[in-house]
Image: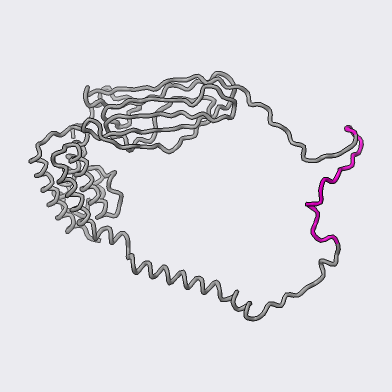
Amino acid sequence: MKPLPAEGKPADFKNLVGQFILTSQLSTTKAQVGDSLTLTLTLSGTGSLKNLQTVDTGPLENFKVYDDKPLFEASVMNGKIGGKLTIKKALVPLAPGALSVPAASMSYFDTVSQSYKTIRGNSYVVQVSQASAKEKLDLMQSPGQSGSQKQEIELLGKDILPIHTNTAAFSSQRLNPPLSMFLIFMLLPPAFFLILLGFKRARERSTGDPGAQRQKNAYKMFLKNLADAQRALEDESLFYQAGAKALKDFIGDKLNIAGQALTAKDLDSLFAVKIPPDMLHELKSMLDFFDSGQFGFKKISASERKAVLETMQKIAQLLNRAVRK
Protein backbone atom coordinates (compact mmCIF):
# COMPACT_ATOMS: atom_id res chain seq x y z
CA MET A 1 0.00 0.00 0.00
CA LYS A 2 1.38 3.41 -0.97
CA PRO A 3 2.34 5.46 2.13
CA LEU A 4 0.65 8.81 2.75
CA PRO A 5 2.73 11.88 1.84
CA ALA A 6 4.48 13.70 4.67
CA GLU A 7 4.23 17.06 2.94
CA GLY A 8 1.22 19.09 4.02
CA LYS A 9 0.16 16.67 6.77
CA PRO A 10 -1.86 18.62 9.43
CA ALA A 11 -0.80 18.44 13.07
CA ASP A 12 -4.20 17.00 14.09
CA PHE A 13 -4.19 14.27 11.40
CA LYS A 14 -5.43 10.94 12.89
CA ASN A 15 -4.81 8.60 9.90
CA LEU A 16 -8.29 9.27 8.51
CA VAL A 17 -8.33 8.34 4.80
CA GLY A 18 -11.26 8.68 2.40
CA GLN A 19 -13.90 11.38 1.80
CA PHE A 20 -15.92 12.84 4.69
CA ILE A 21 -18.49 15.44 5.78
CA LEU A 22 -18.65 16.91 9.32
CA THR A 23 -21.85 18.41 10.78
CA SER A 24 -22.58 19.72 14.29
CA GLN A 25 -25.68 20.56 16.32
CA LEU A 26 -26.12 22.18 19.77
CA SER A 27 -29.29 21.39 21.71
CA THR A 28 -29.81 25.04 22.83
CA THR A 29 -28.01 28.38 22.92
CA LYS A 30 -29.73 29.65 26.09
CA ALA A 31 -29.06 28.09 29.49
CA GLN A 32 -28.38 28.70 33.18
CA VAL A 33 -25.18 27.92 35.05
CA GLY A 34 -25.17 24.20 35.81
CA ASP A 35 -27.56 23.22 33.00
CA SER A 36 -26.53 20.50 30.55
CA LEU A 37 -26.30 21.14 26.79
CA THR A 38 -25.70 18.44 24.18
CA LEU A 39 -23.23 18.99 21.34
CA THR A 40 -23.72 16.36 18.59
CA LEU A 41 -20.96 15.88 15.99
CA THR A 42 -21.62 13.64 12.98
CA LEU A 43 -18.79 12.52 10.69
CA SER A 44 -19.91 10.56 7.64
CA GLY A 45 -18.35 9.33 4.41
CA THR A 46 -16.25 6.53 2.95
CA GLY A 47 -13.05 5.39 4.66
CA SER A 48 -11.56 4.20 7.94
CA LEU A 49 -14.02 5.64 10.48
CA LYS A 50 -14.53 2.67 12.82
CA ASN A 51 -11.53 3.22 15.12
CA LEU A 52 -11.95 6.99 15.47
CA GLN A 53 -12.96 7.96 19.02
CA THR A 54 -13.26 11.76 19.05
CA VAL A 55 -13.32 14.96 17.00
CA ASP A 56 -11.33 18.04 18.00
CA THR A 57 -13.65 20.71 19.45
CA GLY A 58 -10.97 23.24 20.39
CA PRO A 59 -10.83 24.94 23.84
CA LEU A 60 -14.19 24.98 25.64
CA GLU A 61 -13.57 27.63 28.29
CA ASN A 62 -15.99 27.87 31.24
CA PHE A 63 -17.57 24.53 30.29
CA LYS A 64 -17.35 21.17 32.02
CA VAL A 65 -17.27 18.53 29.25
CA TYR A 66 -18.55 14.95 29.53
CA ASP A 67 -17.91 12.64 26.54
CA ASP A 68 -20.47 10.02 25.59
CA LYS A 69 -19.48 6.74 23.93
CA PRO A 70 -19.12 7.20 20.13
CA LEU A 71 -21.68 5.40 17.94
CA PHE A 72 -20.51 3.97 14.61
CA GLU A 73 -22.85 2.74 11.87
CA ALA A 74 -21.11 0.95 8.98
CA SER A 75 -22.39 1.15 5.42
CA VAL A 76 -21.29 0.76 1.78
CA MET A 77 -21.54 3.94 -0.31
CA ASN A 78 -20.82 3.92 -4.05
CA GLY A 79 -19.13 0.54 -3.71
CA LYS A 80 -16.83 1.70 -0.91
CA ILE A 81 -16.78 0.83 2.79
CA GLY A 82 -17.69 3.72 5.08
CA GLY A 83 -20.39 4.79 7.49
CA LYS A 84 -21.42 7.38 10.03
CA LEU A 85 -19.75 8.21 13.36
CA THR A 86 -21.85 10.11 15.93
CA ILE A 87 -20.10 11.74 18.89
CA LYS A 88 -22.08 13.43 21.67
CA LYS A 89 -20.64 15.70 24.35
CA ALA A 90 -22.50 17.07 27.37
CA LEU A 91 -21.49 20.70 28.03
CA VAL A 92 -22.19 22.18 31.48
CA PRO A 93 -21.64 25.98 31.68
CA LEU A 94 -19.74 27.03 34.80
CA ALA A 95 -20.13 30.81 34.60
CA PRO A 96 -22.72 33.33 33.32
CA GLY A 97 -22.21 35.35 30.15
CA ALA A 98 -21.82 34.79 26.42
CA LEU A 99 -19.79 31.56 26.22
CA SER A 100 -18.25 30.43 22.94
CA VAL A 101 -18.39 26.89 21.56
CA PRO A 102 -15.77 26.83 18.76
CA ALA A 103 -16.26 24.94 15.52
CA ALA A 104 -15.18 21.29 15.68
CA SER A 105 -12.66 20.26 13.03
CA MET A 106 -11.19 17.10 11.52
CA SER A 107 -8.32 16.57 9.06
CA TYR A 108 -8.19 13.69 6.58
CA PHE A 109 -6.45 12.54 3.42
CA ASP A 110 -8.75 12.83 0.40
CA THR A 111 -8.31 9.76 -1.85
CA VAL A 112 -9.78 11.57 -4.87
CA SER A 113 -7.68 14.76 -4.81
CA GLN A 114 -4.73 12.90 -3.19
CA SER A 115 -4.29 15.74 -0.70
CA TYR A 116 -4.94 16.58 2.95
CA LYS A 117 -8.14 18.46 3.79
CA THR A 118 -9.69 19.91 6.96
CA ILE A 119 -13.45 20.04 7.51
CA ARG A 120 -15.29 22.02 10.21
CA GLY A 121 -18.69 22.12 11.86
CA ASN A 122 -20.54 25.20 13.16
CA SER A 123 -19.49 27.48 16.01
CA TYR A 124 -21.99 28.67 18.64
CA VAL A 125 -22.44 31.37 21.30
CA VAL A 126 -24.40 30.29 24.38
CA GLN A 127 -26.12 32.97 26.47
CA VAL A 128 -25.74 31.73 30.05
CA SER A 129 -27.63 33.30 32.95
CA GLN A 130 -27.00 32.90 36.68
CA ALA A 131 -28.81 29.96 38.26
CA SER A 132 -31.88 30.87 40.35
CA ALA A 133 -31.57 30.56 44.14
CA LYS A 134 -32.63 27.21 45.50
CA GLU A 135 -35.80 27.13 47.56
CA LYS A 136 -35.10 26.72 51.28
CA LEU A 137 -37.08 24.09 53.19
CA ASP A 138 -38.26 24.51 56.83
CA LEU A 139 -37.41 21.26 58.58
CA MET A 140 -38.79 22.22 62.03
CA GLN A 141 -41.84 24.20 63.09
CA SER A 142 -41.62 26.20 66.35
CA PRO A 143 -44.27 28.62 67.69
CA GLY A 144 -43.63 31.86 69.50
CA GLN A 145 -41.94 35.09 68.62
CA SER A 146 -38.70 35.26 66.68
CA GLY A 147 -35.59 36.70 68.23
CA SER A 148 -33.38 35.75 71.12
CA GLN A 149 -36.23 34.52 73.32
CA LYS A 150 -36.22 30.83 74.12
CA GLN A 151 -38.78 29.00 71.99
CA GLU A 152 -40.54 25.77 72.68
CA ILE A 153 -40.42 23.18 69.93
CA GLU A 154 -43.81 21.93 68.87
CA LEU A 155 -43.97 18.14 68.52
CA LEU A 156 -45.40 17.36 65.09
CA GLY A 157 -45.71 13.59 65.42
CA LYS A 158 -44.76 10.50 67.34
CA ASP A 159 -43.56 8.46 64.40
CA ILE A 160 -39.91 8.81 65.42
CA LEU A 161 -40.38 7.88 69.11
CA PRO A 162 -38.92 4.57 70.34
CA ILE A 163 -41.24 1.61 70.08
CA HIS A 164 -40.66 0.67 73.73
CA THR A 165 -41.60 3.31 76.29
CA ASN A 166 -40.78 1.45 79.54
CA THR A 167 -37.97 -0.72 80.92
CA ALA A 168 -40.06 -3.87 81.05
CA ALA A 169 -39.42 -4.38 77.37
CA PHE A 170 -35.71 -4.83 78.09
CA SER A 171 -36.05 -7.80 80.44
CA SER A 172 -33.82 -10.81 79.75
CA GLN A 173 -35.34 -13.43 77.47
CA ARG A 174 -33.92 -16.71 76.24
CA LEU A 175 -34.28 -18.21 72.80
CA ASN A 176 -34.44 -21.98 72.73
CA PRO A 177 -34.80 -23.09 69.08
CA PRO A 178 -35.29 -26.82 68.42
CA LEU A 179 -32.12 -28.81 67.75
CA SER A 180 -33.35 -29.80 64.29
CA MET A 181 -33.72 -26.13 63.27
CA PHE A 182 -30.23 -25.41 64.54
CA LEU A 183 -28.76 -28.27 62.48
CA ILE A 184 -30.61 -27.15 59.35
CA PHE A 185 -29.18 -23.63 59.54
CA MET A 186 -25.70 -25.04 60.18
CA LEU A 187 -25.81 -27.41 57.21
CA LEU A 188 -27.47 -25.10 54.65
CA PRO A 189 -24.34 -23.09 53.63
CA PRO A 190 -22.06 -26.09 52.90
CA ALA A 191 -24.91 -27.90 51.13
CA PHE A 192 -25.58 -24.85 48.94
CA PHE A 193 -21.86 -24.61 48.16
CA LEU A 194 -21.67 -28.26 47.11
CA ILE A 195 -24.70 -27.88 44.83
CA LEU A 196 -23.14 -24.87 43.09
CA LEU A 197 -19.83 -26.69 42.74
CA GLY A 198 -21.61 -29.63 41.11
CA PHE A 199 -23.36 -27.34 38.62
CA LYS A 200 -20.05 -25.63 37.80
CA ARG A 201 -18.22 -28.89 37.12
CA ALA A 202 -21.09 -30.24 35.03
CA ARG A 203 -21.06 -27.10 32.94
CA GLU A 204 -17.29 -27.29 32.46
CA ARG A 205 -17.57 -30.91 31.31
CA SER A 206 -20.29 -30.02 28.81
CA THR A 207 -18.71 -26.87 27.35
CA GLY A 208 -14.98 -27.52 27.75
CA ASP A 209 -12.38 -24.77 27.26
CA PRO A 210 -14.01 -22.05 25.06
CA GLY A 211 -10.61 -20.93 23.73
CA ALA A 212 -9.63 -24.46 22.72
CA GLN A 213 -13.03 -25.01 21.05
CA ARG A 214 -12.64 -21.77 19.13
CA GLN A 215 -9.19 -22.80 17.88
CA LYS A 216 -10.40 -26.28 17.01
CA ASN A 217 -13.27 -24.93 14.88
CA ALA A 218 -11.22 -22.10 13.29
CA TYR A 219 -10.74 -23.73 9.88
CA LYS A 220 -14.35 -24.92 9.74
CA MET A 221 -15.55 -21.34 10.34
CA PHE A 222 -13.03 -20.11 7.75
CA LEU A 223 -14.54 -22.37 5.08
CA LYS A 224 -17.98 -21.00 5.90
CA ASN A 225 -16.77 -17.39 5.55
CA LEU A 226 -14.83 -18.34 2.40
CA ALA A 227 -18.09 -19.53 0.84
CA ASP A 228 -19.59 -16.09 1.52
CA ALA A 229 -16.62 -14.48 -0.24
CA GLN A 230 -17.03 -16.84 -3.22
CA ARG A 231 -20.69 -15.86 -3.54
CA ALA A 232 -19.58 -12.20 -3.66
CA LEU A 233 -17.14 -12.65 -6.57
CA GLU A 234 -19.28 -10.58 -8.94
CA ASP A 235 -19.70 -7.70 -6.46
CA GLU A 236 -16.26 -6.12 -6.06
CA SER A 237 -16.98 -4.08 -2.92
CA LEU A 238 -18.61 -6.98 -1.09
CA PHE A 239 -15.84 -9.32 -2.23
CA TYR A 240 -13.14 -7.33 -0.43
CA GLN A 241 -15.27 -7.02 2.69
CA ALA A 242 -16.11 -10.76 2.80
CA GLY A 243 -12.52 -11.80 2.02
CA ALA A 244 -11.10 -9.59 4.79
CA LYS A 245 -13.63 -10.98 7.27
CA ALA A 246 -12.78 -14.59 6.39
CA LEU A 247 -9.03 -14.10 6.81
CA LYS A 248 -9.14 -11.88 9.91
CA ASP A 249 -11.69 -14.05 11.69
CA PHE A 250 -9.59 -17.14 10.96
CA ILE A 251 -6.43 -15.54 12.41
CA GLY A 252 -8.40 -14.32 15.43
CA ASP A 253 -9.87 -17.78 16.04
CA LYS A 254 -6.48 -19.50 15.79
CA LEU A 255 -4.95 -17.09 18.33
CA ASN A 256 -8.12 -16.65 20.45
CA ILE A 257 -8.13 -12.86 19.96
CA ALA A 258 -10.41 -10.27 18.30
CA GLY A 259 -9.62 -10.57 14.61
CA GLN A 260 -11.56 -7.81 12.84
CA ALA A 261 -9.25 -5.00 14.02
CA LEU A 262 -6.06 -6.77 12.81
CA THR A 263 -3.67 -5.05 10.40
CA ALA A 264 -0.71 -6.42 8.49
CA LYS A 265 1.65 -4.68 10.94
CA ASP A 266 0.09 -6.57 13.88
CA LEU A 267 1.12 -9.92 12.41
CA ASP A 268 4.83 -9.31 13.05
CA SER A 269 4.37 -9.51 16.83
CA LEU A 270 1.65 -12.18 16.74
CA PHE A 271 3.43 -14.70 14.48
CA ALA A 272 7.13 -13.82 14.82
CA VAL A 273 8.10 -17.19 16.34
CA LYS A 274 5.09 -19.30 15.30
CA ILE A 275 5.31 -19.55 11.50
CA PRO A 276 8.03 -19.40 8.79
CA PRO A 277 8.96 -15.93 7.42
CA ASP A 278 7.63 -16.72 3.92
CA MET A 279 4.21 -17.65 5.33
CA LEU A 280 4.18 -14.48 7.43
CA HIS A 281 4.99 -12.43 4.32
CA GLU A 282 2.12 -14.02 2.35
CA LEU A 283 -0.34 -13.36 5.20
CA LYS A 284 0.68 -9.69 5.44
CA SER A 285 0.39 -9.26 1.66
CA MET A 286 -3.08 -10.83 1.67
CA LEU A 287 -4.30 -8.54 4.49
CA ASP A 288 -2.89 -5.47 2.71
CA PHE A 289 -4.65 -6.56 -0.48
CA PHE A 290 -8.08 -6.80 1.15
CA ASP A 291 -7.69 -3.60 3.19
CA SER A 292 -6.62 -1.54 0.20
CA GLY A 293 -9.38 -3.06 -1.90
CA GLN A 294 -12.07 -1.95 0.56
CA PHE A 295 -11.00 1.67 0.12
CA GLY A 296 -10.90 1.59 -3.66
CA PHE A 297 -7.16 1.20 -4.28
CA LYS A 298 -7.41 -2.20 -6.07
CA LYS A 299 -9.34 -3.02 -9.28
CA ILE A 300 -9.20 -6.63 -10.55
CA SER A 301 -11.44 -8.92 -12.60
CA ALA A 302 -13.77 -11.61 -11.26
CA SER A 303 -11.40 -14.37 -12.43
CA GLU A 304 -8.52 -12.70 -10.61
CA ARG A 305 -10.64 -12.43 -7.47
CA LYS A 306 -11.36 -16.16 -7.68
CA ALA A 307 -7.62 -16.88 -7.86
CA VAL A 308 -7.06 -14.72 -4.78
CA LEU A 309 -9.53 -16.82 -2.79
CA GLU A 310 -7.83 -20.04 -3.88
CA THR A 311 -4.49 -18.64 -2.70
CA MET A 312 -6.03 -17.53 0.59
CA GLN A 313 -7.43 -21.03 1.22
CA LYS A 314 -3.97 -22.57 0.70
CA ILE A 315 -2.44 -20.10 3.16
CA ALA A 316 -5.19 -20.87 5.69
CA GLN A 317 -4.54 -24.61 5.37
CA LEU A 318 -0.82 -24.12 6.05
CA LEU A 319 -1.52 -21.76 8.96
CA ASN A 320 -4.04 -24.20 10.45
CA ARG A 321 -1.34 -26.91 10.58
CA ALA A 322 1.42 -24.57 11.77
CA VAL A 323 -0.42 -22.99 14.72
CA ARG A 324 -1.48 -25.39 17.44
CA LYS A 325 -2.74 -24.85 21.01
Farthest residue, direction left: 303
Seen at 90% across and 33% down, the residue is 145
Q: What's the magenta bit mostly, secondary-structure-wise?
A: loop
Query: With respect to residue 221, does 36 lie above or below?
Result: above
Q: Quadrant of the C terminus?
A: bottom left
- List x then y, in percent, for residue 97: 58, 19
Residue range in magenta is 145-165
Its colouring scheme is one colour
Image quarter for residue 178? bottom right
Seen at 46% across and 35% down, the residue is 67
Image quarter for residue 120? top left
Seen at 86% across and 43% down, the residue is 154
Left or right of 163: which side holds 92? left
- List x then y, in percent, for residue 98: 55, 18
- In the rendered image, residue 163 lying in the magenta stretch gets the answer yes
Image quarter for residue 55? top left
Query: With respect to residue 191, does 296 lie above or below?
Result: above
- List x then y, in percent, for residue 283: 17, 47
Q: Quadrant of the N terminus?
A: top left
Out of 57 and 274, give the one closest to the viewer.
Answer: 57
Out of 270 and 20, give the one closest to the viewer.
Answer: 20
Q: How many marks?
A: 0
- List x then y, in percent, for residue 242: 21, 44
Seen at 33% across and 65% down, the residue is 207
- In the rendered image, residue 157 lying in the magenta stretch gets the answer yes
